[in-house]
Amino acid sequence: MILQIKNLQIGFVNKQNEEKTIVKNFNFSLEKSKITALVGCSGCGKSLIALSILKLLPNNARFSGEIIFENQNLLKLSDDNLQKIRGKKIAMIFQDPNTALNPLHKIGKQISEAIKIHNPKITKIALKKRIEELLKMVELSDLENRLDNYPFQLSGGQKQRVLMAIALANNPQILIADEPTTAIDKNIQVEILNLIKKLSKIYNLSVLLISHNINFVKNLADEIIEIGEKINSEIIVRSSQFNIDNSKNNILFEIKNLQVKHNKSIIIQDLNLTIYQGQNLGIIGQSGSGKSTLAMAIINLIEFKGEINFNFENQLKNWQKNLKYLRNKVQIVFQDPFSSLNPRQKIFDIIAEGLIIHNDKKIAKNQFKNFVNDEVLNIANQLQLPIELLNFYPHQLSGGQRQRVAIARAIILKPQILVLDEPTTALDYQTQNQILKLLINLQKNHPIQYIIISHDHEVIDVMSDKVIEIHDGKIIS
């Protein structure tokens, strides 16, 4: 046994000094050189347990109990003493590399920083050699000549491997992997998990693997510990409620000769697509295929060549020159709600922001505040978001609750098109099904159509009336 948790309790205190307990009397032992999986549904506290090991909990967290490592209680250590353990003896791979990696720093600098923090006197030659060793360890030798790249220039799988290199930089005894595969497609997920298993054996690593997917970890872990409610892994079934009329007068939007470049690389080339009113469009493809790039082009968040014409108010034309109008008609729910929600705003303000921005002043000023309040409460009720959470901040919510907030923020404007970019990848099956059911019910009550982007065939099949597959920026089916 290398680490032991005794009677751990974690809760959060709000401004009214009211405490909500998330983790109660949790006990756990991590065996040396073994992989232990901690599995549970969204909001059960599994990530909080992982963060508590290195005392990375938010300031308003309250905790008690013991976390014993090398005969000392980590919860009682000062920050100075913890800094000697973090990243050196106990390292962590965070769930989303897009938020864990600094977008303003090059990959080489971020890896070298992790090494130099605990070895400040290392020579340039030794540092270069160690970086090469780490890239080889995580099977990223092809990045040796790309250390000047920024995170956005790498694929999801490459970014996750960079996080692994940073975590392994100082030969830790314990590796905590918090949902390390949720943001990448299934093929890359298997590669990452197999790599963790391989590294654990070679370097005698003790691994604590946090996951909501018991099927992925059961062939990897030496021990599986389930916390919270048992996860229901059955996906829901949806039958199309639309009667599609593929007449030219019924076009919702069309894309002609779309091309998207990044630097000198062509991400999407000569893409053509027509979607009719009443069709949910599913876009499927592996990591790096260009499916999210297509979504960014549709909502005009990136530069492109070609035409994207929308049929709003019975006019099929390029509305992208009128961005405020387009944003009112086309909204997006991003893959990771934690990074897309403003951490400094309360949930109520996040949901209400769109109404305030798009206020056309048809409502009298003295009535507008009540209108916004009523709309926020109404949409929160539709999305089964507890009213008391409207006074919380994003970090105080579970993954499923944050995704509900992201959907509420988009839906409150009553758009005609909602783009859903991997809306369920970071969620367990149970929460995933809840979100999909909510989206289906919303569509029954609102005249809205979805563009669903995913690498998960089950999600695409459930939600889509028309499916296209993208590979290397081209539609292949």
Image (spheres, rainbow, N blue to C red):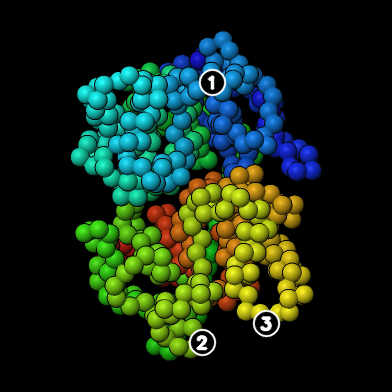
Quarter of the picture containing the C terminus is bottom left
Amino acid type at image mark 2: Glu
Q: Nearer the viewer, residue 162 or 118?
A: 118
Q: Are marks 1 and 2 in contact (CB under 8 Å)?
A: no
Amino acid type at image mark 3: Lys
Q: Quadrant of residue 194?
A: top left
Q: Which of marks 3 and 2 precedes in the sequence?
A: 2
Give me the disc on residue 96.
Answer: none
Q: Quadrant of residue 360?
A: bottom right
Q: Position of residue 80 (x, y in %)?
A: 54, 20
Query: What residue is disc 2 on?
Result: 313
Amino acid type at image mark 1: Asp
Q: Are marks 3 and 1 in contact (CB under 8 Å)?
A: no
Residue shown at the point (42%, 46%) measured from the top left: 98
Query: What residue is disc 1 on?
Result: 80
Q: Secondary structure at mark 2?
A: loop
